[in-house]
Amino acid sequence: MISDIMAKEINTQINRELYSAYLYLAMSADAMNKGFKGAAAWFAVQFGEEQGHALRFIRYLQDQNAKVELQAIDAPKRAWKDLLDMFLNTLAHENTVTANINKLMSLAVLEKDFATQGALQWFVNEQVEEEANDAEVIWMLEMASGSKGALFMADKKLGERK
Ligand SMILES: [Fe+2]
Ligand SMILES: [Fe+2]
């Protein structure tokens, strides 16, 4: 049993996770258009992860016998300047997702909703990993800046993500 407000906030978060999925799918398509097959694969993996996040919240609502209420997903941008621009946007987006997860956690603490706090802890940890991964890719792309060979290698490395 969770509060109506908590159920509503989690439903909003499900929409944000699905928007994240859609955003990374758009980046995957744009990376492919620009000839970066590795980055396209990296974002395709992330597209799958974000759907997994949405499903995890959906299952949590269902376990708590709360209604899943899906909302319209906003259209993402279609093109970015370059790979670095995509990953800078990715990190900025994940920073806002982290802030949203923290807000949900604050509500769960306020409501003494221990079950939701437990469910959210997985997402708190996941966000640390997401931001670290993005920062590492940004570092790699900044190092590669100006060198086509290094950019080629960076794209190859991105393609290794499972
Ligand atoms: Fe997510
Ligand atoms: Fe992740």
Image (cartoon, rainbow, N blue to C red):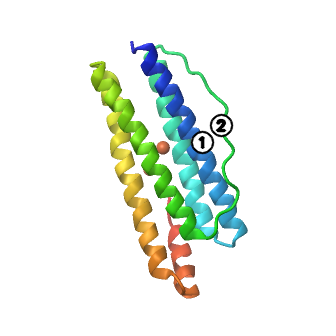
Horizontal placement of 156 versus 30: left or right?
A: left
Give the quadrant of residue 159.
bottom right
Disc 1 marks which amino acid? Tyr
Tell me where residue 4 appears, x and y as whole percent: 45, 14
Residue contact between numbered discs 2 and 1, judged by CB atoms under 8 Å? yes
User: Of the residues shown, which amino acid type is indicated by label 2?
Assistant: Ile
Q: Where is residue 69 in the image (x, y as percent from the top left)?
A: 59, 22
- The foreground one among 39 and 134 is 134
Cα distance, mark 2 to mark 1? 6 Å
Of the two numbered discs 2 and 1 on the same chain, state the one appearing first in sequence. 1
Which residue is located at x 46 percent, y 57 percent?
Answer: 91
Q: Does any atom of ligand 1 lie closer than 8 Å to the CB of label 2?
A: no
Is residue 159 something that shows in the picture? no
Disc 1 residue: CB within 8 Å of ligand 1: no
Q: Disc 2 on helix, strand or loop? A: loop
Residue drawn at x 40%, y 42% is 99
Can residue 43 be seen at all in this image of the molecule?
yes
Q: How many residues crowd around disc 2 within 10 Å: few (fewer than 14), some, or many (20 or more)? A: some
Q: Where residue 36 sits in the image (x, y, percent)?
A: 64, 71
Which one is in front, 77 or 26?
77
> Which numbered marker is on residue 73?
2
Q: How crowded is mark 1: few (under 14 residues within 10 Å), some or many (20 or more)?
A: many
Give the residue pinned by disc 1.
Answer: 19
SS state under label 1: helix
Name the residue located 38 percent from the left edge and 31 percent from the top edge.
Answer: 104
83 over 102 or under it: above or below: below
